[in-house]
Image: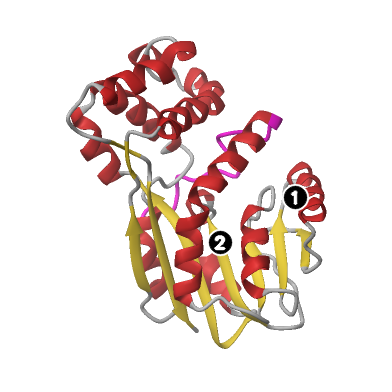
Amino acid sequence: MTTNRRSADYPLGHTDAEHERLIRQAKQVAPITERFFRESGIGPGQRVLDLGSGVGDVAMLVAGLVGPSGEVVAVERDQNSIAKARARVTEAGFHNVIFNESNVNEILDEKPFDAAVGRFILMYLPDPVATLRSISQVVRPGGIIVFQEPTWVPVIAHLQALPLWFATASLIDKTMRVSANHDMGAELYDTFVEAGLPAPTVRMELPMGKEPYLAQWYHNTLSSLLPQVERLHMPIESVGPLDTLVERLQNEVANSKTVACWFASVGAWCRK
């Protein structure tokens, strides 16, 4: 398992534009996450730890699952993200979510959790095994541990039939791999086992189709990554002008006899 290439810096940045991109992405991925969480056993009345909560989308999803009798303790290290998350939670009317500014490996809570969850967080950590081992200490015996992470190998393989989609996805993938594990989803099973947890149940979902949101997501993600692309001298010319990328992506798939795809999400869960 590769664990030495992740950096402490989030490669997509912490700009307002990136926060908005994350919120739009969260709306699209929420049904997948909810299916993973429900199947793992997340439900009413539970006290749940949310790792790396960002601008609060997972925390709010879990808050809805556990209901008013449950509680979500969300951990995030970026102050701006926490401020936006708190405002969004208040606006949404949730009263069972608490945000703590903390590192995911430094969870201090005297009361045990019924579950620990995370979405697209282990991929950015230098030692995900150590993180899982650490958080398992604050989950009660019989409690649930569930994570959702991406894997890009099936994405790149499928998109070879669509040259522009393939070039765009490959550019994102190569840039992200400098500071993140873009196949963390495929490594979840071994990560759980190496952390001393029971072998997890694992599922993968790969949304496919010709819907416009797919092209827009690739454009928005590449836009957030652009400073990294330029710093690393990645071949941005391979995708052409960004201001017309969505239209060109959509035209390519519309005129093809295949479909485009999003990134693949892998969910893994077990009971401690």
Q: Main secondary structure of the magenta part?
A: loop
Q: Are marks 2 and 1 in contact (CB under 8 Å)?
A: no
Q: Position of residue 163 (x, y in %)?
A: 24, 22
Q: Decide: is 189 above or below 102.
A: below
Asked if 265 appears above or below 166 in the picture, the reply is: below
235 and 129: which is toward the camera:
235
Which residue occupies 59% across, 72% down?
116
Residue 129 visible in the displayed image? no
- Amino acid tagged 2: Gly
At which x and y percent is residue 211?
A: 38, 34
Q: Position of residue 232 (x, y in %)?
A: 46, 22
Quadrant of the snapshot with the N terminus: bottom left
- Residue 158 sits in which quadrant? top left
- Which residue, given by chain and number where applicable, does mark 2 sit on? 118
Residue 212 is inside the magenta segment: no
Whole-percent x, y for residue 58 in the image: 61, 57
The stretch in magenta equals 1-16
Q: How much space separates mark 2 and mark 1, taking CA atoms?
A: 15 Å
Which residue in the rendered view is the most extreme toward the bottom? 141
**58 left or right of 97?**
left
**Total numbered badges shown on the rendered structure:** 2
> Which residue is more in the foreground, 234 or 145?
145
| Nearer to the camera, 158 or 212 | 212
Q: Residues within 10 Å of mark 2 (few under 14, many from 20)?
A: many
Taking the spot 52% from the left edge, 74% from the top edge, the residue there is: 145
Within-10-Å neighbours for mark 1: few <14, some 14–19, many 20+: many
Q: For the residue labelled by badge 2, is the local secondary structure a helix, a strand or a loop?
A: strand
State the residue at coordinates (44%, 74%): 39
What residue sits right under mark 1 in the picture?
85
Front position in the image: 261 or 223: 261
Quick check: 258 left or right of 231? left
Q: Which picture quadrant has residue 257? A: top left
